[in-house]
Image (cartoon, rainbow, N blue to C red):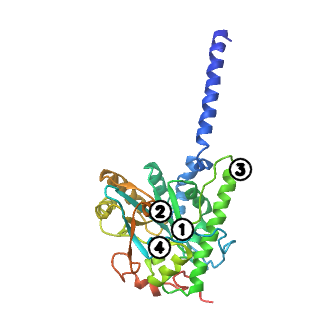
Amino acid sequence: MNKRFVFAAVPLLLLAALCAAAAAAGRSKNPLDLWTTAQLAQPANRTKARAERSIRHLPAPDMAAPARTAPVEPLPALPEQRRGIIRRVQLPAGDRRVALTFDLCERTVHITGYDARLVDALRRANARATFFAGGKWLRSHPERAEQLMADSRFELGNHSWAHANMEVAPAEFRQRQVDWTAGQYELLRDDLDRRLAAKGLPPSHRGPMTLFRLPYGRGGAEVAAFLNGLGYAVIQWDVVGEGGRGNAQARAEAIAEAVRPGSIVLLHANAVPKDTAEVLRRLLPLLARRGYATATVSELLAAGLPQTAPEGYFTFPGDNAIYDNAFEGYGTGARRR
Ligand SMILES: [Zn+2]
């Protein structure tokens, strides 16, 4: 072998090794490094990818309780100004942030999936977002749930265990729906932190969930007082991001037109609506062009004054009362026992 080549190559190889080590050390600061890019994305196999974002109906309702039915970590008392049913946040002049929120609803009768394309679009745009997860959804999608928990741009809120209609459910049922979800969240968060520690990665720094979204948007002052008493801020929306007329571009434009600084936009990250990912891909650049930045709901709350309504609804009060008799088990689909 050419000696001059060897003398030139050794320092180069050393340098390359040092660079690789430095890159690895740099990367290791992020809990998301627990997964490869491919593992975070939708499955490469098209059939698997489609299956993941499809609803799967169960042969019988899944009524099983989680392994932890009550949270261990206490919630701090809710600040007075965060009581009630919050629809948007009044921000200081010049603050043009909006909160994109994604529900992960799941009743007892189905598994509702996960739309990785949508989460990819958020990550590519470096957008911040809040996910309101059903406890049963967390249990049926543990890996995806932990990926969301590991991403510091995202926050998670409580969406009841199995999409209970809090307006019609009795007190004990409500309490279980909230606590089971908080318990399941803790189990996954602790599992995530164990996995991170095993790989020498930093912990998730996730505290307990402090936000609650009313399933079906159903609930009034009494429901809000109950949830506020547990320490949860009740977060609804002032912009409905799904439904509407036209193709994905037209609907994205309608959302961008409807938002104001401090808006909270209702969307879903599971298979409940079909093409939210298409709308979101178009919405993110439209918002940026209008000078909007994204924030989590907690970041909006920290910056401004919540604006509340006496009850939850989609676009006008009472438009969701039809859900009161839609499903058995107070909206969860559970069979009566
Ligand atoms: Zn929901």
What type is the residue that disc 1 sits on?
Thr
Q: Secondary structure at mark 2?
A: helix
Return the residue nearer the eye: 79 or 310: 79
Asked if labels 2 and 1 touch by Cβ distance under 8 angstroms, the answer is: yes
Which disc number belongs to residue 210? 1
Upstream in sequence: badge 1 or badge 4: 4
Upstream in sequence: badge 3 or badge 4: 4
What type is the residue that disc 2 sits on?
Ser
Return the residue nearer the eye: 249 or 310: 310
> Outermost residue, right direction?
198
Upstream in sequence: badge 1 or badge 3: 3
What type is the residue that disc 4 sits on?
Glu
Q: Label 4: which residue?
A: 80
Q: Label 3: which residue?
A: 198
Asked if labels 2 and 3 touch by Cβ distance under 8 angstroms, the answer is: no
Q: Quadrant of the N terminus?
A: top right
What type is the residue that disc 3 sits on?
Ala
Q: For ligand 1, tell me if the residue under mark 4 lies within 8 Å.
A: no
The answer for how far apart the CA atoms under marks 1 and 3 are is 28 Å
Q: Position of residue 205 (x, y in %)?
A: 60, 56
